[in-house]
Amino acid sequence: MIFEGLAEKLQNTLGKLKSKGKLSEKDVKDAMREVKLALLEADVNFKVVKQFVDKVKERAVGQEVMESLTPGQHVIKIVNEELTSLMGDVQSKINFSSKPPTVIMLVGLQGAGKTTTAGKLGNYLKKQGKKPLLVACDVYRPAAIKQLKVVGGQLDIPVFEMGDKVSPVEIAKQGLAHGVDSGRDVVIIDTAGRLHIDEQLMDELVNIKSELRPHEILLVIDSMTGQDAVNVAESFNEALGIDGVILTKLDGDTRGGAALSVKAVTQKPVKFVGMGEKLNELEPFYPDRMASRILG
Ligand code: GDP
């Protein structure tokens, strides 16, 4: 089950409200205290939690809810709507350029799942009838280029590479030119990651951005790292400007904090989620479906 601990606690708390006939203001407040604790335990950013709980409380102690015949259901509906809103309301899609190729730049820290996600995204787009090209710009992580080539081979997607002795900016430029020449309509740039955010990494990414003017800069973050992932997203967004987030490893034992906080903190939506190591395990992110999965 996704976000098991959080889902269980929310369902328990809200289930208790459902079994009551009438609700008092105290019932709602007590339940919201439990909701707050559950969200904090799930590693959701505390400011986000406070705003969320205040909003639900404000709506839930209203006359309409208190006087309704099924007030518990009503409160659950409000929680569902506010959770959905927290995650961005509607699905955020990729912006395709009206003049192909669409350039998608993938950025992120080492180990977040960037190279795997480059392959997954290529595979997803290929299934939609696109002709992607993968460009290997991660010249620092040993074996990253080889890894991308293996992934491309498995998916039958071409990979452009120039080894690890050429600067990433140059590889990106030549990769794009190659994509244009060979009639590819999406060029996915797998940039380098580092273990930590540093100036050199950001400078390099800013350079690639200004050379290539990508249509999408997507940040790959590891959902297992919770609020750290959200801090990473904030830093990348400030230094580089991102268009959206791909949240990996949602299939693991993750508590939910990153998925629930990142949009509210950065104002940038989650566009896709990684649901496993396999190259077909990437899904578009639907805030409403995620809220319903959490609330059962
Ligand atoms: P990079 O350093 O960011 O390029 O990271 P990699 O693409 O090499 O991925 C690091 C590890 O995370 C690899 O073992 C991947 O198989 C794994 N990984 C990536 N995405 C997912 C995911 O959505 N779920 C799971 N369970 N593992 C993932």
Image (cartoon, rainbow, N blue to C red):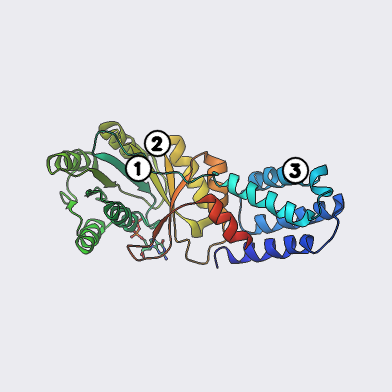
Give the CA separation, mark 3 to mark 1: 45 Å
Q: Is mark 3 within 8 Å of ligand 1?
A: no
Q: Which residue in the protein does label 3 denote? A: 59
The residue depicted at 48 percent of the width and 61 percent of the height is 250
Q: Earlier in the sequence, mark 3 or mark 2?
A: 3
Q: Which residue in the protein does label 2 denote? A: 240
Residue 42 location in percent, x, y?
62, 58
- Whether residues under marks 3 and 1 lie with C-beta atoms below 8 angstroms apart, the answer is no
The residue depicted at 83 percent of the width and 61 percent of the height is 20
The answer to whether 81 appears left or right of 231 in the picture is right
Mark 2 is on which residue type? Leu
**Quadrant of the picture in which ligand 1 is shown:** bottom left
Q: Earlier in the sequence, mark 3 or mark 1?
A: 3
Residue 229 location in percent, x, y?
49, 51
Residue 240 location in percent, x, y?
40, 36
The answer to whether 180 appears left or right of 281 in the picture is left
Q: Quadrant of the C terminus?
A: bottom right
SS at mark 1 in the image:
helix
Q: Quadrant of residue 244?
A: top left
SS at mark 2 in the image:
loop
- Whether residues under marks 2 and 1 lie with C-beta atoms below 8 angstroms apart, the answer is no
SS at mark 3 in the image:
helix
